[in-house]
Amino acid sequence: MADSSIVTLGPGRSLLVDSSVYDSRMAETTKEQFFMGLHADETEDVLPRVETRVVLVGEAGNIAELEKALQDINTPCIKTDNVRDFGDGENCEFENVFVLKDFQAPEYSFLYKNDSRILGPPAVMHCASKGEPLPFSSRPLYCMTMLNLSLCFTGFRKKDEVVTLVNLVHHMGGTIRKDFDSAKVSHLIAHSTHGEKYRLAVCMGTPILTPEWIRKAWEHRDDINFHASNEEFRTEFKVPPFQDCVLSFLGFSEEEKINMEERTQKHGGRVQAVGDERCTHLVVEENSIKELPFTPSKRLYVVKQEWFWGSIQMDARAGESMYSYEKPESPAMKKAVSLLSLTTPNSGRKRRRLRETLAQLTKETEISPFPPRKRPSAEHSLSMGSLLDISNTPDTCKSSGENAKPPKSSTPALPKQSARWQVSKELYQTESNYVDILATVLQLFKYPLEKEGQVGGPILAQEEIKTIFGSIPDIYDVHTRIKADLEELVMNWSEERSVGDIILKYSRELVKAYPPFVNFFEMSKETIVRCERQKPRFHAFLKINQSKPECGRQTLVELLIRPVQRLPSVALLLNDIKKHTSDDNPDKVTLEKAIESLKEVMTHINEDKRKTEGQKQIFDVVYEVDGCPANLLSSHRSLVHRVETIALGDKPCDRGEHVTLFLFNDCLEIARKRHKVITTFRSPLGQTRPPAQLKHIALMPLSQIRRVLDIQDTEDCQNAFALVVRPPTEQENLLFSFQLTAEDTLKSAWLKTLCRQVANTICRADAEDLIQSTDPDSVQVSTKDMDSTLSRASRAIKKTSKKVTRAFSFTKTPKRVLQRAFMANGTPDERSPGPDADHMGRMSSSSTLAASHSPSMINLSSAFERKYHTFSRSTTHLI
């Protein structure tokens, strides 16, 4: 049977129990005998055969789905309204499982005191949906909302509250552990941010939640598809990092203080004035505060601002011991310490180390992207420090190649320290600083953001990280090699050495690395600003890292702009080197080639940037115009101009409609203003896009424009123009007339731009010949009363009429389909070939169509056709 299984005790003998687990009472009787290895015949009388039976109590008996679930797992059931009929629950024939809807009812208390097996309807239906037998549980089990979850509690002072929460967890299938074991505890329920368990959970990345999570999960107990570990559900109940903390801030500007106070309250903390006895933490700006204004109490944590931002970044309270504020040592204390150190056995070694440190500090390069650092890197101090002391004679260069030490007091030879060498040295210095900046960007920002297993989860999505940093790693790689080559050149300098060759060697790699970053730098900057505003953890991450000495008090945006500025700077330095290079030096020609290669890289960047901006403009049009054709997106297409107009005729839309014309280099997108705006679009990344304001009408190739009419201004017609269009699907010319509405749009300039693009498309040199001036009466165009009440009412009636016509139309069959249908059903004579068969076929089908009465095309007005035949005759002379 599905609800039972057999546990073998010996040959040919078995014990029938529920869920492959011993019943509690049976286990108490037989456990000792079973594990002592008694024979089956000795236990036959002790373990009788028992069948499981479900007892539906009260309201549970009225749930049809519950009865069906029991049938699915082949479990017999009975119904009762009085559980006392079952006595103390002991029954030799059946193992009763009671199913109750209400775990607060008197029936529940009675069954619980009698140690009966109690289940809730969701638990039974969950088993049926999984095809599993009923679970065995020594505790009442209502649902599986917390199945496989193991919880630990910390920070609670009221025992009754803990007991209530523990019972709810057990009712939902969860387990409780007294001690925090990271391998077994899945969630920590914390009432405060203090204690060892909280610290361990933060270190192990265990979710730390409020007790409200358990209560809210219990409210979903009747939903068998719900589980409390759902990430979206539990995020709401995370313990904020500053819960039960009272913070005060010292040494910050007013703007910074207001910002930090707001974030404190947002993350569960409170704010008090400096010196208030209720404060638990004093956050100090260590760079501006040299001495505290009062003696802090033992219970007050005095921490650096890095603790504050680190807590927000981790989304958990950071340990105070790592960020403890220490009072700077006074000069008197430093002197006392130094005097004590002189008496130690290692005083000679310490003095030698001090001299070495001072020597390194004096070798710090003059050109630095940041303020002087505490300890320059070994590589930088070696290369740049030695540059100031090298005597660049051939003998010296040779000895340096043999790893010989230079003389202690070597004076650089004057002829060798030429202006060309000085500028080359400056090129190397700036290149070294630039590589340091790129390394800082990667090591302090990019790599930590990409690191897996971050406390509190990823700070940014991978798409956002890619958008921000782009091709920075590629730029760093190529410039690291350029720096190494320049270092070798300057260290082994001679006037014949070529600087230009180094730049030419990497020119192709520069072309590949720079455009992807420079072209999307604005997008990178916008992403940083948006993420910093929307994601508090990213804001805290930036605050922590931007305050480090490596950043030199510069923001991430300021550091990322360096690649944009680097190539022009290199080009200027190469020009300086070229000025100080003699004409007979082969490097002069090489430098010219190197400068040209850099100009090509920058030109390539500018071209790509223009193309990128043009493609972005096209995407903006696609997003702005609802129903815009996908084929508008093309690599060769670019947006030339955009004008706002009002339609003056019945084509391409109704008179009085606000129409936007998007002129591309090969086509014209025509869109009207939407009457109803659709809802805002939200991308998978959570970014919102404004709703489309325009509705697509037509995407017309410029080759279909036969003439551009400059309509003369009169009292009844102002700022109007028209297009004579011949679509391939039409037999006659069509007239699209518009009135310019933007005051800053000059009609003559717009028409010239339009004609130039049309001429380019149809390969004509005489663009101005496409413009023809005409009076408004000849083409029946007028702008009079466009904004009058009568005109607006007329447009509203026309729109309503169209809606009513569509609503009562019984067929949506297009006219061409009907024409083909009538031609297919015509007589053989009508379809027979002849001299005028094609003409007569069209005439007969048209006449048949006109004679028939289609519900959706009740009146094909002949006046409509006459209107366009008349227009065709009147405009033939314009072509």
Image (cartoon, rainbow, N blue to C red):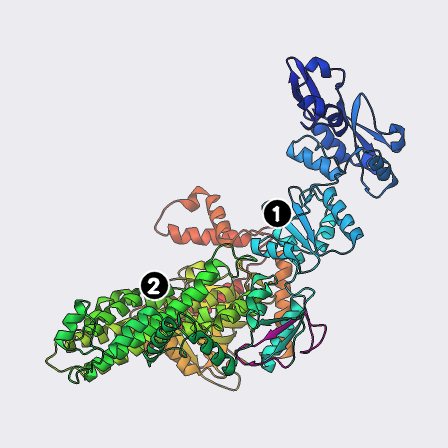
Determine if the magenta segment contains residue 59.
no
Main secondary structure type of the part rendered in magenta: loop
Residue 244 placement (x, y as % from top left): 70, 65
Q: In the rendered view, would you say 719 is above or below 639?
A: below
Q: Position of residue 25 (x, y in %)?
A: 77, 28
Image spot of residue 525 (x, y percent)? 46, 71
Residue 244 lies left or right of residue 708; in this view the side is: right
Question: Which part of the image, by quadrant, shows the C terminus?
Answer: bottom left
Instruction: State the quadrant of the N terminus.
Output: top right
Does residue 270 show up magenta in the picture?
Answer: yes
Q: Is residue 696 above or below residue 745?
A: above
Q: Quadrant of residue 869?
A: bottom left
Would residue 873 be visible to someone looking at this image? no
Q: Residues within 10 Å of mark 2 (few under 14, many from 20)?
A: some
Most foreground residue, 803 or 105: 105
Q: Nearer the viewer, residue 110 or 594?
A: 110
The reply to whether the C-beta atoms of the residues labelled 1 and 2 are less than 8 Å apart is: no
Q: Which residue is mark 2?
A: 474
The answer to whether residue 715 of the structure is visible from this angle is yes
Residue 537 in picture, x, y percent from top left: 56, 65
Q: Left of 292 or right of it: where is 841?
A: left
**Mark 1 burial class by Cα count in 10 Å: few <14, some 14-19, many 20+:** some
At horizontal 18% and vertical 83% (from top left) the residue drawn is: 418
- Highlighted magenta segment, given as a residue range: 269-293
- The Cα atoms of the two marked residues, 1 and 2, are separated by 44 Å
Q: Amino acid at mark 1?
A: Asp
**Residue shown at 45%/76% (left/top)?**
554
Question: Outermost residue toward the bottom?
Answer: 715
The disc at residue 181 is 1
| Res 420 quadrant in image | bottom left
Q: What amino acid type should be assigned to the residue bearing mark 2?
A: Asp
